Image (cartoon, rainbow, N blue to C red):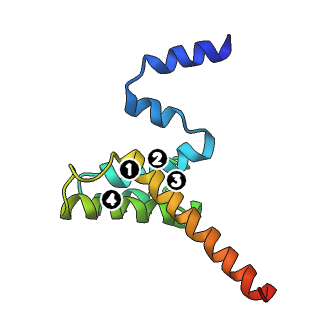
């Protein structure tokens, strides 16, 4: 019954909203910083939003990059903005899929590095 109601509620949302709602807990929190960088009107505003974050620990203003270690999200957001300006938005995937692709690529790179390290330390 719960799952049926959940899917019914999801179907009433637009597709972009469904993607974000599918994230749980801290995944949605970290994705929100990426989305903030991508959707900011200017590069300066994007950086200001993450370096002077007022929403996470209100009423205090914090440096979210250092506090929450969101370097990956900021770099992916800046990369998306750069590619959007250079090659155009039509060629790029949706920001959601771009973020997923970056996350998978970074995870794969980390796993390859870990395997190479284990191989070199193990003598194999």
Local packing at callout 1 (Cα closer than 10 Å; few below 14, some 14-19, many 20+) is some
Q: Kindly identify which numbered label has been placed on residue 32.
A: 2
The answer to whether the residues at label 1 and label 2 have Cβ atoms under 8 Å apart is: yes
How far apart are the alpha carbons under marks 1 and 2? 6 Å
Residue at 58% x, 63% y is: 107
Q: Note whether 7 is above or below 53 in the view shown.
A: above
Which callout, 2 or 3, points at the residue further toward the start of the chain?
2
Asked if the residues shown at circle 3 and circle 4 are in contact, with their CB atoms under 8 angstroms apart, the answer is no
Q: Is residue 63 visible?
A: no
Element carrying mark 2: helix
Compared across the picture, whether 70 is left or right of 123 comes to left
**Label located before the other in sequence (3 or 1):** 1
Report which residue position mark 1 lands on.
36
Q: Residues within 10 Å of mark 3 (few under 14, many from 20)?
A: few
* Quadrant the C terminus occupies: bottom right
- Judging by the rendered image, the residue that carries numbered circle 3 is 60
Pick whichever of labels 3 and 4 is earlier in the sequence: 3
Identify the disc placed on residue 80.
4
Q: Nearer the viewer, mark 2 or mark 3?
A: 2
- For the residues labelled 1 and 4, say whether their Cβ atoms are less than 8 Å apart: no
**Residue at the (67%, 80%) spot, across then down:** 116
């Amino acid at each position: 019954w719960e799952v049926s109601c959940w899917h019914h509620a999801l179907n009433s949302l637009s597709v972009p909203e469904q993607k974000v709602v599918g994230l749980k807990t801290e995944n949605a929190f970290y994705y929100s910083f990426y989305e903030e960088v991508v959707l900011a009107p200017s590069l300066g505003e994007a950086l200001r939003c993450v370096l002077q974050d007022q929403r996470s620990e209100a009423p205090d203003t914090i440096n979210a990059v250092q506090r929450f270690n969101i370097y990956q999200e900021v770099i992916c957001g800046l990369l998306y903005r750069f590619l959007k300006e250079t090659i155009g938005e039509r060629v790029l995937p949706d920001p959601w899929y771009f973020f997923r692709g970056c996350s998978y690529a970074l995870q794969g790179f980390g796993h390859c590095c870990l395997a190479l390290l284990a191989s070199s330390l193990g003598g194999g």
